[in-house]
Image (cartoon, grey):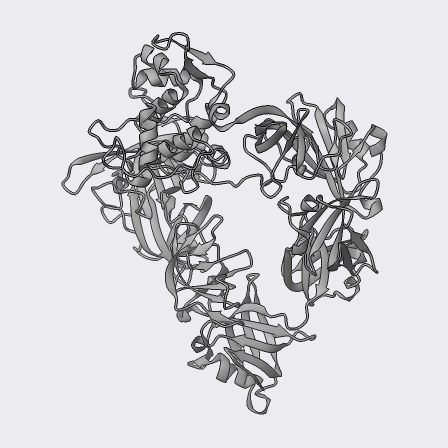
Amino acid sequence: MKKIISIFLITSVLFSFCAVTSMADSATDETVADYSGDYDFCLRLGMFPENLDPKAPIKRIDLARIFSNVIMYGTDLQPLGESEIFSDVTSDQAIYADLVAKLGIMVGQGDGRFNPDGYMTYEQVTKCMVSFLGYEAMAESYGGYPSGYMAAATVLKITGVAPKYPTSYITTENVATFFKRAIGCPLMERKAYNPDEKTYISNYEKDYLSEYMNIYTLMGTIEAVYGTNTVNSQNLEYDEIIIKDTKMKYDTKKDNLISMLGFRGDAYYKVDGDTYTLEYFEPDLNEVEYYDYDDDDLYKIREEKKPYDKNIKIIYNGEICKTYPDVYMNPWSYQELDGGVTFIDNNSDNKYDYMFIDAYETYEVDFIIDGVIHLAKRSGEVINFREYEDGKEVLFTNVEGMPISPDKIKKGDILSVSKGQSGKVRNIVVSIDNFIGEVNQIEYTDDLYTLDVEGNIFDSSRTLYRNSDMKDINQGMAVKLKFDKHGLVASVEPYDFSYMQLAYLVDAKTGRGMDVDENVQIKIFTGAGLFEILKLNRKVLVTKGLEVTKVDASKAVTDYIGTIDARAVQQVIMFEKDEEGNVRALKLIDPDAGKIDGLFSFGQASSLEYRSGTTSCLGGQILLNKSTKIFSVPTEEYRDNEEMYSIFTFYGGKSYTVEAFGTEKMSPFASAVVMKVDRATELFNPLGVFVIDSVTKSLDENGAEGVKVSGFMDGAEKVYFTEGDNLKIAPGNAYPECGDIIRFKLNGYGKIESPTLIYDKSEKKIENSDKNPSSTTYSAQNRSIFGKIIWADDNGMTIEATGKDDFGNVTSLKESYVKSSNFNYYICEKIQGKSQMRKSSPAEFWAYPEGSGVDETVYIYCISGDPKAIVLYK
């Protein structure tokens, strides 16, 4: 039994219900706030405009616009022309600035200016929110601005994520947190019977969502969706759900709420007569457990796991099972189905409330005619979805759960089809993922396949053995794998010999004399990180740019691949094997052909910054995906050193000198990227620094005298060698000591070259400078900071660093960092009088008050402001 458990205390929407935007480290004078989902919430409800950066400090005019969007919700706000109040706002900005000023929510600078591009601080936003909700009198009674408003916000429980200093700039994400927490806070209204009296009363029937936006909140469980109703016998339309006995409509193009059945959360909805329209659903406090079963019966789950609620709802592929005996079955192996079981405890009572049995079969599409899907390789089987009228809008979904139209389905797509116990199709997940490669090994056990394709191991679905092509699949063949919704192989088909594999050509040799074309070989470095030697057929079909010709094998090397000093020119190639494994076709690059369909270069090698995350690209010009091969190879001088060839992984925020290659002229995606190095430079040390534990004279692996350097890099313990006095870079022409931090390069033989001391522990100096480079900004890509921890908790810490400016003046800088588990933490400490290095964890990094007797300092190395290595000196 294979078991996967995931527990969510959900405060943001699951199952791709809304977009996720990561929260980066904020600037020094901004509030540091993790991603909370509150920005997405406010954006979805129409409060926030779409052009704001959630991690950037918010501008005054943007906050004014947000308040205006809420207060004038549903109104088309047209420019007023010139402002009636302020002299420094544009005609587009005037309507927002004037509105918040007239309502007393935001005021200008007192000189007739609004300062629209100025940033808001935490205490300023707090004042605005208290005023917006009508609690000025309370705030003034507590002492007025700023402390009285801060106190009022605390009492009202509407505060955002508090920074260390209330005068810090506040991010847009944190502003969204204010608005989110203000939901449910009753608006304060002046007593109507005495409008001049300075007393107010809370209107508990109104919060700002209901007052201004006609949006109401309901906490409850999604109890019924299209096709599955657990509360009554009512048949819902495809765009309807029931939450806590309340039927609501929703937009199926934005949300997939069918997959949210059984989840408890907050529903935000509008009311128009008798129609309730859901605007946003936010799951909360649901514990979800998923079990992927092979042959275990379901009753074992019931006996071995946590208790069930007495009113548990059991759903098999969307159909309700009324009693426990209805699930005394194995819905998978005996029926040749795949799937698993999902449990939901949605009320924190440690008992299952919902049990979902997922049992599906996989098919491959041949063609669709008149509402009938004809299936490939399945002897005339079809899926008829004519009976689904409006339900077709939600019957088909992609692997992320979002509805797709049937007319988007095409030949070769894989369908994961779930049918209820009645036999009715309940859901069809359409997947298009595939993988092309050469089969290394096939194993077949109990009607299940395990395939090794180019070093990647894939498990099959239970229905793969019914694929009529499987009998023809053999080791060494090129195949195309297609996957079902859970990533299991649902289809394998021979890939004809137009299949071209991509590799880096390392070398080539021809035969001699009369046999010049008999034993021509090429040596390649593959995308799997392996070297291969392949034989060329006597005649090879060569495509170079737009030229296609069949030539003798020797001429393919000398005239087309090309040689320099009798050595083959190293380059990216594509090749095709015949049935015997020999190369029968080559595809080469012709620089003069430009961008063509086939194989081309994006241009000369250049330095480009790699941008990670959802936009995986080089310099915003060349896109990368999971199939892009990134070859790190040596320059001509070191071409015979096989240790210098590798498949590389780029790291965000670093620049690389590369040449990129594509195969489709209209596509910005690269099929291969080549990075040439004459030594293992910092490219092979993405974190850029090496923390020394010890430096000793020793014999290297070849028995030669040298210097052994032990320490930590990239979160692992490393050992390197160098020669002579190369490493005498510490003050007094000495070797670095334990706790010192260096950068270096490796030559073609893996030995240290060009070491640089970037932190001297004994002198407490960075990069041999009197100045502390940490006084620069985040615009410095590689930067260091050294100082003391002045504040810390379980989640973050603040460092205070001191240094000198260009004039010798002492400078001070404070920076805050989240204690991310992705960073590399080390500690240098004295044990029995001797300094030693060890790996550490965030839990050991704390602040201690003056006079405590604890003297600890911290060094942090950053790339693009993102900490990569953190060393604590005890």
Q: Residue at x 68, y 24 (%)?
A: 245
Task: Pick the quarter of the image with the C terminus.
Answer: top left
Task: Pick the quarter of the image with the N terminus.
Answer: top right
Q: Position of residue 821 (x, y in %)?
A: 47, 37
Residue placed most toward the observer, 291 or 363: 363
Q: Is residue 562 above or below residue 348?
A: below
Q: Position of residue 858 (x, y in %)?
A: 34, 34
Q: Position of residue 88 (x, y in %)?
A: 24, 37
Q: Residue at x 62, y 30 (%)?
A: 275
Image side of residue 264 versus residue 110, left or right: right
Residue lying at the far left in this picture: please name it.
807
Q: Residue at x 72, y 55 (%)?
A: 490
Q: Is residue 466 above or below residue 796?
A: below
Image side of residue 324 versus residue 35, left or right: right
Q: Position of residue 390 (x, y in %)?
A: 70, 44
Image side of residue 267 versus residue 45, left or right: right
Residue placed most toward the observer, 234 or 833: 234
Q: Is residue 165 visible?
A: no
